[in-house]
Image (cartoon, rainbow, N blue to C red):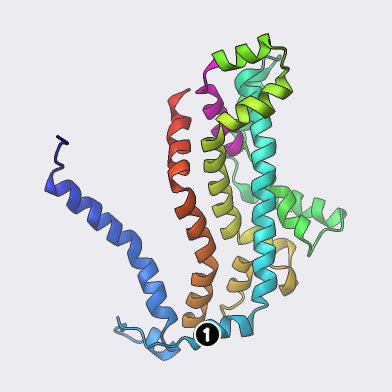
């Protein structure tokens, strides 16, 4: 017979859930209002059924091109980090080479540096390559991350060494062990990293604004930022566009949430 949870625990969980859902509910309500109703004081809690706000998003923005740019950017960053971070993480977790611990500490030290400090040198590199206003300019700098290496290294450390030793006895080398044995076993960790990178890439605003000024080459986050005027912002249209842009990420997380939670929980099992 399962242990019954105290009523207070359920009350805290319900209150926390409502606090997290409230912004999304307010976003949906605002997207169905007029501008005057959305900016009225006191605010109205009832939508007005203005579905034309969603149509205005496609009129004001090249939404299809920006959505495709965002998908390609997110897919490229996810694929790059899953490949490169997993290789580096496997080397740090399983292989022996001189200076491994020192090099790993250097990798971790990158996490303490604000990412804004890398903007100028990265911009200069993109400019020298002639990549400004291009997809590769927003994809390539996100192909690798120190956090991804740390996350997957912790996961690889939690895998049993007996499987790896058995593969060595059968004649498998480090590359074969990594590709055919360790990667399939690390699937929850790879899913966790993929979801995190997808969220970061999908919501990335600063870097796409720096390297891209062409609306057809922008991502959704940069395109939606362009809807904010200097003197006035059409908040219902902005909320409608934000809601449309967030639906794919919500769907991916709902579909992969079990593996995501399992992967994140497993990474803390080894130090």
On the image, the x and y values in percent for residue 227 come to 58, 78
Between residues 132 and 159, which one lies in front from this camera angle? Answer: 159
Label 1 element class: loop
Q: Is residue 198 visible?
A: yes
Q: The N terminus lies in which quarter of the figure?
A: top left
Judge from the rendering whether residue 14 lies leftward or rightward of residue 213; answer left or right: left
On the image, the x and y values in percent for residue 73 come to 68, 57
Q: Is residue 153 magenta?
A: yes
Between residues 174 and 245, which one lies in front from this camera angle? Answer: 174
Residue positioned 61% across, 55% down in the render: 201
Q: Which residue is mark 1?
A: 232
Residue positioned 52% across, 22% down in the render: 159
Residue positioned 58% across, 52% down in the render: 198
On the image, the x and y values in percent for residue 145 come to 64, 40
Magenta: main secondary structure equals helix
Q: Is residue 213 visible?
A: no
Residue positioned 35% across, 84% down in the render: 47
Residue 208, placed above or below residue 173? below
Q: Which region is colored magenta? A: 147-161
- The answer to which quarter of the image holds residue 150 is top right
On the image, the x and y values in percent for residue 148 come to 59, 38
- The answer to which quarter of the image holds residue 182 is top right
Judge from the rendering whether residue 243 lies leftward or rightward of residue 137; answer left or right: left
Residue 204, placed above or below residue 154? below
Please give the count of numbered marks on the rendered protein: 1
How would you rate the neighbour count of disc 1 (Cα within 10 Å): few for under 14, some for 14-19, many for 20 or more? few
Q: Is residue 114 magenta?
A: no
- Which residue lies most toward the top here? 169
Judge from the rendering whether residue 32 lies leftward or rightward of residue 86; answer left or right: left
- Which residue lies most toward the front here? 170
């Amino acid at each position: 017979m399962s242990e019954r949870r105290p009523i207070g625990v359920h009350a805290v969980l319900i209150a926390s859930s409502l606090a997290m859902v409230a912004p999304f509910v307010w976003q949906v309500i605002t997207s169905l209002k007029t501008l005057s109703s959305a900016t009225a004081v006191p605010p109205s809690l009832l939508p007005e059924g203005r579905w034309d706000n969603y149509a205005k998003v496609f009129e004001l923005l090249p939404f299809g091109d920006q959505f495709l740019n965002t998908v390609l950017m997110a897919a490229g960053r996810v694929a790059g980090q899953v490949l490169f971070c997993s290789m580096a993480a496997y080397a740090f977790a399983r292989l022996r080479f001189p200076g491994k611990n020192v090099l790993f500490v250097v990798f971790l030290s990158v996490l303490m540096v604000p990412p804004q400090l890398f903007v100028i040198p990265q911009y200069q590199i993109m400019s020298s390559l002639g990549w400004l206003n291009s997809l590769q300019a927003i994809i390539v700098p996100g192909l690798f991350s120190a956090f991804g290496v740390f996350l997957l290294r912790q996961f690889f450390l939690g895998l049993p060494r007996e499987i790896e030793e058995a593969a060595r006895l059968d004649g498998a080398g480090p590359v074969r062990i990594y590709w055919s044995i360790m990667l399939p076993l690390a699937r929850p960790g790879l899913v966790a990293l993929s979801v995190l990178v997808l969220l970061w890439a999908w919501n990335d605003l600063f870097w796409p604004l720096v390297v891209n000024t062409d609306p057809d080459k922008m991502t959704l986050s940069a395109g939606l930022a362009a809807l904010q005027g200097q003197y006035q912002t059409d908040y219902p249209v902005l909320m409608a566009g934000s809601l449309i842009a967030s639906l794919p990420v919500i769907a991916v997380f709902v579909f992969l949430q079990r593996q995501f939670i399992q992967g994140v929980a497993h990474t803390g099992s080894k130090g």
